[in-house]
Amino acid sequence: MADYLPHTSTEVEEMLSFLGMNSMDELFAHIPAAVQLAQGLDLPAGVSEPDVAASFAQLTSANRATTTALTCYAGAGAYDHEVPAVVKALGSRSEFMTAYTPYQPEVAQGILQAIFEYQTLIARLSGLPIANASLYDAATALVEALNMAHGATGRSKMIVSAGVHPHWRSVIKTFALGTGHEIVEVPLHNGTTDLSLVDVSNAAAVVAAYPNYLGVLEDLTTPKEIARANGALFVIGGDPVAAGVLKTAGQWGADVFVGEGQPFGTALSFGGPYLGLFACTQEQIRRLPGRIVGETVDSNNRRSFVTTLRAREQDIRREKATSNVCTNQTLMAVTAAIQLGWLGTNGLREVATRCAQGAHYLFDRVVEVAGVRAVSTEPFFREFAVTLPMSANEVISKMADEGILAGIAVRALAGERDASLATDNENVLLISVTERRTRSELDRYVKILEKVVAK
Amino acid sequence: MSRTAAPGGRAASAPLLGHEIEPTLFELSVAGRSSYQLRTTDVPATPLSDLVPIEHLNDEVVKLAEVSERDLVGHFTRLAHRQFAVDLGAYPLGSCTMKYNPKFCDAVAGDPGLNSVHPAAPAHLCQGWLELLVTLEATLCTITGMKAATLQPAAGAAGELTGLLLMRAYHTANGDPRRRVLIPDSAHGTNPASVTLGGYEVTTIPSTDRGLVDIEKLKAELDTDVAGIMLTNPNTVGLFEEQIVEIAQAVHEVGGLLYYDGANLNAILGVVRPGDMGFDIVHMNLHKTFATPHGGGGPGAGPVAVSARLADYLPGPKAVRLHDGSFDWSTPPRSIGRVHGWHGNALVLARALAYIQVHGSDGLRRVAQHAVLNANWLRVRLRATLPAAYDTTCMHECVLSASALKADYGVRGLDVAKALLEEGFHSPTVYFPLIVDEALMFEPTETESPQTLEALAQALERIAALAVSDPERLHRAPQTTPVSRVDEARAARQLVSTEDAAGR
């Protein structure tokens, strides 16, 4: 019998008697007896926090954590970056954690200003003028980008590179069941998108990934030109860490940028809560999904912040709204602002550079291992795919025994008949390197891989 | 009943040092300062231009901010001090269930065995996570009276849309796609927006003068083109739809499905289950009912539970228990596909399970009882000050109206809400539901004490007295908060959403 209720039994009696009632059951007397639970829920009785902690300890011990048991080379949008004590401490302040959506700006300037700073940072990293206050994750941000493209063009055909993360593509197909959008996937060739394979006419959006999910940096000049020539929005799904050194989405000519913000201060967390990044051009502002914070003044002329352009949102436009997003991922956005504040201009550049240096160091050695070859000859940033002489799952399993999470089996990520893959995909392994990997760890990776594939 | 107002839940004593604006992170920036420290890796520092072709490199530096760690801490701590939160005081924001969020649940989620697991790790390396998801799914099904669930949706609105896509998949598989979804006029705005995105047309059902669904008008709209109905029960005026069984029967008779919007599930935990009322699809807001912190606007989690006939359509992959007792991923045979990039807001799911296990079957029922007790006590306590729109036994929230204050003294609901901030309480939800004039929707939640409720009532009495004596002061309220009323029109008229747009 445990709970967080303050009422003493005397107080409960007093309150009931104030209502002219004798028992709690009377509060529910107007609910038809036929549907009320006679016996209560068929769940165990409540237990104390230490008891629950003990049962959770059983669960957590059946996981292999990247902090203790496994050195992480898995990525695909979820990266093992440094999250310093200061970011954890500030991001977990209870004023940020236990607030609701900032509906009353007079007592929500903390969250509102932090979001304003977050919007500024994301706008700069995407090279676009407008960023919203966050969406659930990159995949659902892409759904919103397509809905925006539909609103902007009145068209429903979405041209999507198979270099876009397979899970994001799966998510947009799911939501297309409701919107009726036609999703046309463009297959990869040598790890890059070949737009000549599809009919782009009458498209609402052309979607490219930068880098693509196999790590490859594609030249986005042609996709942009094709999008422009056909009157479609050009959407880039990108790695925001890359923006520390590589061309921004805006510089590539994107109308919309979406990305996964997990690398900015959020632990791997088994995939959530993460952070959907969304930025766009000024032209699309009236179709922006989710919330946006704007600067204004209070009645005493002091600088203040408030959620604005509210007329777009679901609670006002109801069935005419172009997005149903209400709750987003504010705490992760605030955390990202703190992490980017900690990194600063030079820190982000250094993280991005070290990711690239580590990945190339490892790539050069991994492709020297007998039987291992690169999937693509194209340039990459911090992640790359290789074909192994045996199943990627088997290699991951054996290397895990040596304390290494070797990467991600691409077939497990993409599924068997994905447009991004060649037929012998069972052996493809996706490897990612962050700034946290040391040279000795990378050397050990190669050594263990040699041993595993030699068997 | 009047009692001592010695509340734990009033934040009027919170120290606020001064009323100056907080500089932005960018205003604090000094070129050359830094706070980051990275691991020593000894990886060769090959120039980037040797690794990546020049046409991919940005020849400009993207400027962030450059601050010391001390300034970073000062800035975000001062921002935290400009933010109201449940941990500071009572947050009776109707429909949002801003109850106390146990610290224990945060500690559970902070375990590296949960938060440092990669989402693409093979199943044999994350058996604990898979078991957690299987256990939570079963638990949520027990609580709602459903057969199976997806834990992927990241928030309530994502759950709604997922539920509507399940509805669509079910009807489509039966060769009978249908076009319309019925929604009461008191529904949350996410409902109609989700219906549109689900590819359906909204038909609005009016409420009666008792605040309940007008069942005759509902029946008049029912035909074989109705895919289903979305209902919140208790509804958004805090009342239980007493004719729910009859509604369910009528909708099922024409082949429609019933969707339960779980925004108000807190009111009925362990008392009555959506499945037993006849619902086919249920979404839950774990950040409301199961006390996971709302984070200033997220993350939430919006699992969707369904009856047996819809289970095969659920998003996948799902965690499942195999015959040998181990756990793996499996996609339902007719799955609509993924609705999240990975497995949903996993750490939110873990917190919710911890919360449910602490409470257990008995504790969850007490949660509902005390939530309903608090709301009814407040409704009756304030009868003379702010009458309820529908003065009958309510559930976990009560919708009061400032209609009389407006008519008599020109004081609107918004003025009352703003003045309450100065009293150390968060405002109720204002102007919702739309069917109530000058609505003030109070949801005290079960974790506020009778003393806090009395203090809240007395604060509202003082505000009502001011409406008579000094209405102008209420129009200007609040003045003691970090900022006073903000110029929302200006914010919308000339959008300044970044430091760059501000020209700083």
Image (cartoon, coloured by chain):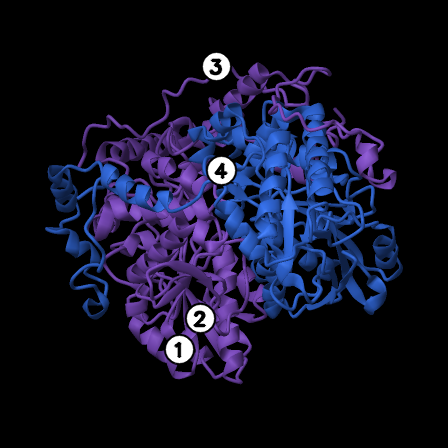
Chain colours: A blue, B purple
Q: Quadrant of residue A153?
A: bottom right
Do the dots labelled 1 and 4 sit on one chain?
Answer: yes
Q: Residue at x 37, y 23 (%)?
A: B12
* Residue with the mark numbered 3: B17
Q: Quadrant of the N terminus of chain A?
A: top left
Sequence-first tag of 2 and 4: 2
**Cα–Cα gap, marks 2 and 4:** 31 Å
User: Looking at the image, do the residues carrying marks 3 and 2 touch, with CB atoms under 8 Å apart?
Assistant: no
Within-10-Å neighbours for mark 2: few <14, some 14–19, many 20+: many
* Residue with the mark numbered 4: B296
Q: Residue at x 35, y 64 (%)?
A: B212
Do the dots labelled 3 and 4 sit on one chain?
Answer: yes
Q: Quadrant of residue A305?
A: top right
- Identified by mark 3, the residue type is Leu
Sequence-first tag of 1 and 2: 2
Chain at tag 3: B
- Identified by mark 1, the residue type is Val
* Residue with the mark numbered 1: B251
**Cα–Cα gap, marks 1 and 4:** 38 Å
Image check: A393 left or right of A425?
Answer: left
